Amino acid sequence: MTKDELISKLKTIVQPYIQDEEAFNNLSEKTDFINDLKINSANLVDVILDVEDEFDIRIENEDMEKMISVEAVMAIVNEKLSKK
């Protein structure tokens, strides 16, 4: 999966939870879910669960704690997919 494909899928996943439309429109690898998109911690858990479902992967608790930016999510998803 290319970087652009992964970012596109992540945009679809996070869209229902965002609070900052402008930051969402400018979403990139450097986007922070909490500081940029204003996603609260409860919704961040929903994002993680949606990522698990979308990519058919299992995300461990220690990985969940790191998943606060698009870049971190991409790294974890790619790592999990490479092990399948």
Image: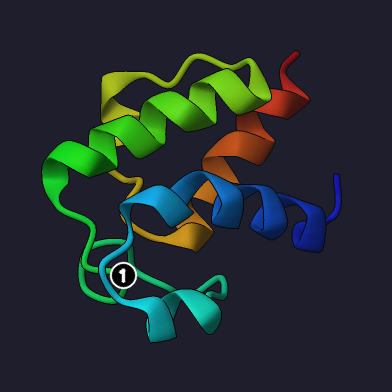
Figure quadrant of residue 43: top left
Residue 75 seen in render: yes
Above or below residue 73? Residue 21 is below
x and y percentages locating residue 60 in the rendered image: 36, 19
Amino acid type, callout 1: Leu
Q: Nearer the viewer, residue 48 or 71?
A: 48
x and y percentages locating residue 46 in the rendered image: 31, 32
What residue lies at 70% left-to-right and 57% top-to-bottom?
Answer: 8
The residue carrying mark 1 is 37
Above or below residue 84? Residue 73 is below
- Specify the farthest residue to the right: 1
How many residues crowd mark 1 within 10 Å: few (<14), some (14–19), many (20+)?
many
What residue lies at 72% left-to-right and 18% top-to-bottom?
Answer: 83
Figure quadrant of residue 18: bottom left
What residue lies at 58% left-to-right and 17% top-to-bottom?
Answer: 57
Above or below residue 78? Residue 36 is below
Figure quadrant of residue 37: bottom left
Q: Is residue 23 left or right of residue 71?
A: left
Q: Where, quadrant-wise, is the C terminus in this rendering? A: top right
What residue lies at 47% left-to-right and 29% top-to-bottom?
Answer: 50
Q: Where, quadrant-wise, is the N terminus in this rendering? A: top right
Above or below residue 60? Residue 15 is below
x and y percentages locating residue 48 in the rendered image: 38, 33
x and y percentages locating residue 23 in the rendered image: 40, 82
